[in-house]
Image: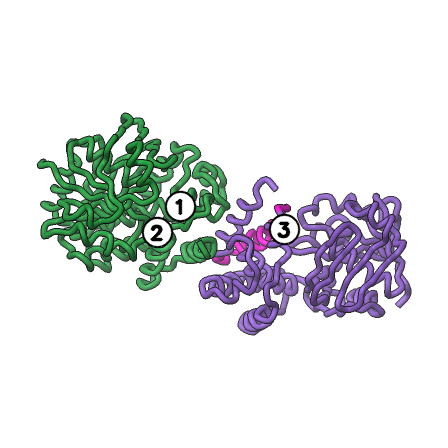
Chain colours: A green, B purple
Amino acid sequence: MDLQRIAVIGSGALGTYYGARLAAAGHEVHFLMRRDYHAVKSAGLNITSPEGDLKLSHPNIYKTSAEIGPADWIICALKSTSIDEAQNLLAPCMAENTRILVLMNGLGLEERFAGWFGAQRIFGGMAFTCINRGKPGHTHHLAYGPITIGHFQDDKAELAKAIGLWSQSKVTIFESPCLLQSRWEKLGWNIPFSGLAVAAGGITTDRIMQDAGLNSAAHALMAEVLTAGNADLEHHSQKTRIDRGVLIDLFFKSTSTMGAYKPSTMIDFVEGRAMEIEAIFGEPLRRAQSLGVPVPQLTLLTTLLRALNHGR
Amino acid sequence: MDLQRIAVIGSGALGTYYGARLAAAGHEVHFLMRRDYHAVKSAGLNITSPEGDLKLSHPNIYKTSAEIGPADWIICALKSTSIDEAQNLLAPCMAENTRILVLMNGLGLEERFAGWFGAQRIFGGMAFTCINRGKPGHTHHLAYGPITIGHFQDDKAELAKAIGLWSQSKVTIFESPCLLQSRWEKLGWNIPFSGLAVAAGGITTDRIMQDAGLNSAAHALMAEVLTAGNADLEHHSQKTRIDRGVLIDLFFKSTSTMGAYKPSTMIDFVEGRAMEIEAIFGEPLRRAQSLGVPVPQLTLLTTLLRALNHGR
């Protein structure tokens, strides 16, 4: 694939890691950077990773999107709590053929980007990974790393272009034939495990697996979410459905090998930061309620998480 | 009524306050005391109360029940987390006609006492009050104060004796014609308001009232609990039932006037003490489940509270 001009909007842990991987693959990557701007300007961007450490000594970093200007691709890796700022942050990087990869957590975000910039250019990315920010200018990629990518309208030719972008990188990409289904599948894991990890006081996923009550609660929540997901797929006239039994087995088996994993929402919770409640919990809940799917445990969990997020 | 010899087992906030009220009414009250023994020995028992302050300069206090010996009445005001110690703590105070008032929170406690000492002598008391311990030897009665008392077998003649015990005191007593129903009714308030106050991070009841999501969750939990209560009443061949609509209205109206009330379980939570989860939440949940009543939100709430109580 031709080398692309890429704007990374939101240079947190995810944005810096995946942006650096694309830079290492030869693309021209430009980072919109806030917190770490001065540290990176003086000491570069430093990534530790089991896939090989990376150092970008003089990355292209900017304090405003206008300085980046038009790009072939925008990778939007903002926290979903900043979704309302996304339109203004991306607009200066837009050109006629610019494509946007929404590398964020939660449901309904691509719809916002499609409304602002047109549906044909929008992709959603779900990163299955554990990446933390260290001191300014340092990012620690700890484990996993694949991204599942789908096109907002499930256009196969468009999807191929998104896959191609990563072809020379060390990042494994899975193709999603149905972005909406993939989003719900990821929520099927994220809602029970991130939600219980927070609501049970800030615990790791191994405790949820080992505690009979929490394990059972995770099963019940997962079933509610995936049932709502299938109703939403039907509502959107999608032909595919989630095979709930298979996915639940798969998620519990894979989580049992994760050890003391800290979901990002749980890390936000214990470190006192705003949690991404509305995109990960609120929007799925709203859809389930509007579709008439009974989700009593998701309802209570979301209510508690909103209360715990209060004032952050 | 004749003056009675009373043993107060568990001299926390509730035990000291109500024991002092009975002493002020002329009864011979003996306190089993742990934490505050030395402070009370040297400076007496000091109670502040909107019903009038009380000071017992030289109350009868003991470190062991054996020193108290046989009593006419035992008021057991232990925390329900100490229920397994209750038999040994009460035994030295038992005589042939000793009666026991179980002034504790939760469901199924009277059954334990009935199994140990015989059903005919067991009463349950539900205090609707706000009482905190201050520094050693000091108890602060802040608001409310009535006790609803029922006999374990709903024996009217026996119940009259329990009511009579308090006749010269400043404590308002309500008679419960059906102890099991009264226990469930109290749980109908306690489970949603205490449970959400803890699970939402340690908040006061006014926040539950004002937040639309928490208010709705409180309604849903209350309905689940009272439905389970009615099934349990039926299971125990009781003829009475809780009028759920009336009680829910009453509870929400009365809670709206409480202001920033701190349920005792929420105080335990924020101060890092063990919470009374099994008696208040676990036993009602077990009964609902064994009776086949769907209680998805009670299930999740109890699971979260157990996790939050872990290691305390």
In this picture, which residue range is highlighted in magenta? B272-296
Residue B124: percent from left, percent from top:
72, 59
Chain of the residue under the numbered disc 1 shown in the image: A
Residue type, mark 1 in image: Thr
Name the N-terminal-most of marks 1 and 2: 1
Q: How crowded is mark 3: few (under 14 residues within 10 Å), some or many (20 or more)?
A: some
What residue appears at the point 28 percent right and 32 percent down from the top-left corner?
A44
Q: Can residue A200 be seen in this view?
A: yes
Residue type, mark 2 in image: Ile
Question: How far apart are the alpha carbons under marks 1 and 2?
Answer: 9 Å
Prevailing secondary structure class for the magenta stretch in the rendered image: helix
Task: Judge whether A190 appears above or below A42 on screen.
Answer: below
* Labels 3 and 2 positioned on one and the same chain: no
Question: How far apart are the alpha carbons under marks 3 and 1?
Answer: 26 Å
Residue A193: percent from left, percent from top:
40, 44
Is residue A60 rendered magenta in the image? no
Badge 1 is on which residue? A265
Badge 2 is on which residue? A280
Question: How far apart are the alpha carbons under marks 3 and 2?
Answer: 31 Å
Residue A245: percent from left, percent from top:
32, 44
